């Protein structure tokens, strides 16, 4: 009888409906409760027909209307979206920055080349000593194999450096294309695409606290944020994202058009 009664009661409306379709809740689990750290889920108040995000922990009472939280996130990514009028200047800065980084790569390539040539000399010397019967076969095999493996490792490191230096302008253009369309991608994407974009921008998600009505983050995409900071500097606007309580100068330092090798 107890089970039958509870089964009937479970079918009665409780004033809200838990959302099972994630398309209406792109920030589901991505936004965490600032009090307990659990991801927010969603429900609809049937009487008002208003959707809310809420903490799953009973008694936590941390919730926010879907409309308000979506507007907050839309404002956040609006600050990160690059405007076309600043694209050429940002592209120039990125090229200068990567150019400075490549100076260090060039020095590393020269160092690897010297080490590779030194290994060649050691290998040739080992082969010569073996031919002259100055060392036994087991020692010859041991050291020749060692030098060959070290040569392969140096070749791998050299290839990695060369790969990092190639197609730079193409990569920069892809980054800027992506940054110019953040708002469009978030509004037009399905749940999966939105979630991927959100975690790309903020790898550890966001947190929301109802008491202070604040959204915060502990980790962000540094390249996207740095370009957004430079854009605001170019536009003579106060740097930061008020909706996220982020102040750019404290994160990336003051940036102009001059190259900076340590901030990207």
Image (cartoon, rainbow, N blue to C red):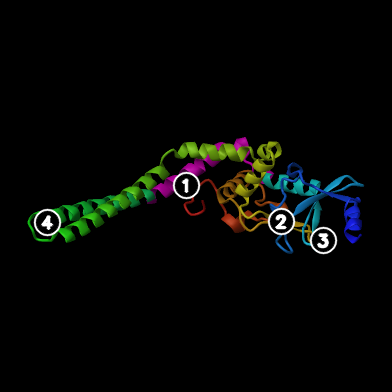
The residue under the point 36% across, 45% down is 159
Q: Which residues are magenta?
A: 78-104
Residues packed near mark 3 inside 10 Å, few (<14), some (14 to 19) or many (20 plus) = some
Give percent across and percent down for residue 247.
65, 56
- Measured in 3D between alpha carbons, the distance from the residue under mark 4 to the one under mark 3, in whole angstroms, is 79 Å
**Mark sitting earlier along the chain (1/4):** 1
158 in the magenta segment = no
Left or right placement of residue 76 versus residue 133 in this view: right
**Mark sitting earlier along the chain (4/3):** 3
Residue 130, label in figure: 4
Q: Residue tagged by mark 3?
A: 61
- Measured in 3D between alpha carbons, the distance from the residue under mark 2 to the one under mark 3, in whole angstroms, is 13 Å
| Residue sitting nearer the eye, 213 or 186 | 186
Give the label, 2 or 4, closer to the camera.
4
**Mark sitting earlier along the chain (2/3):** 2
Q: Secondary structure at mark 3?
A: loop
Give the label, 2 or 1, closer to the camera.
2
- Measured in 3D between alpha carbons, the distance from the residue under mark 3 to the one under mark 1, in whole angstroms, is 47 Å
Q: Secondary structure at mark 2?
A: loop
Is residue 253 visible in the rendered structure shown here? no
Q: Answer above or below: position of 115 versus 78.
A: below
Give percent across and percent down for residue 149.
28, 53
């Amino acid at each position: 009888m107890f089970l039958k009664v509870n089964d009937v009661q479970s079918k009665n409306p409780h004033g809200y409906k838990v959302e099972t379709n994630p398309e209406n809740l792109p920030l589901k689990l991505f936004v965490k409760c600032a009090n307990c750290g659990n991801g927010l889920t969603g429900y609809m108040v049937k009487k008002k027909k208003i959707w809310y995000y809420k903490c799953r922990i009973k008694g936590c009472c941390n919730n926010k209307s879907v409309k308000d939280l979506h507007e907050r996130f839309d404002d956040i990514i609006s600050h990160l979206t690059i405007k076309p009028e600043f694209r050429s200047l940002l592209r120039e800065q990125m090229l200068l920055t990567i150019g400075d980084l490549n100076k260090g790569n060039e020095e590393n390539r020269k160092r690897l080349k010297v080490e590779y040539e030194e290994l060649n000399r050691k290998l040739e010397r080992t082969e010569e000593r073996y031919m002259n019967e100055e060392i036994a076969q087991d020692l010859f095999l041991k050291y020749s194999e060692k030098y060959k493996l070290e040569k392969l490792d140096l070749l791998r490191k050299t290839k990695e450096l060369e790969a990092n230096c190639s197609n730079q302008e193409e990569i920069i253009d892809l980054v800027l294309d992506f940054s110019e369309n953040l708002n469009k991608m978030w509004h037009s994407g399905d749940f999966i695409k939105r979630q991927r974009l959100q975690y790309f921008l903020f790898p550890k998600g966001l947190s929301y606290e109802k008491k202070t009505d604040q959204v915060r983050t502990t980790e962000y995409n540094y390249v996207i944020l740095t370009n957004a900071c430079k854009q605001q500097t170019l536009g003579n606007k106060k740097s930061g994202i008020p909706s996220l309580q982020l102040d750019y100068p404290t994160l990336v330092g003051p940036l102009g058009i001059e190259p900076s090798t340590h901030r990207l």
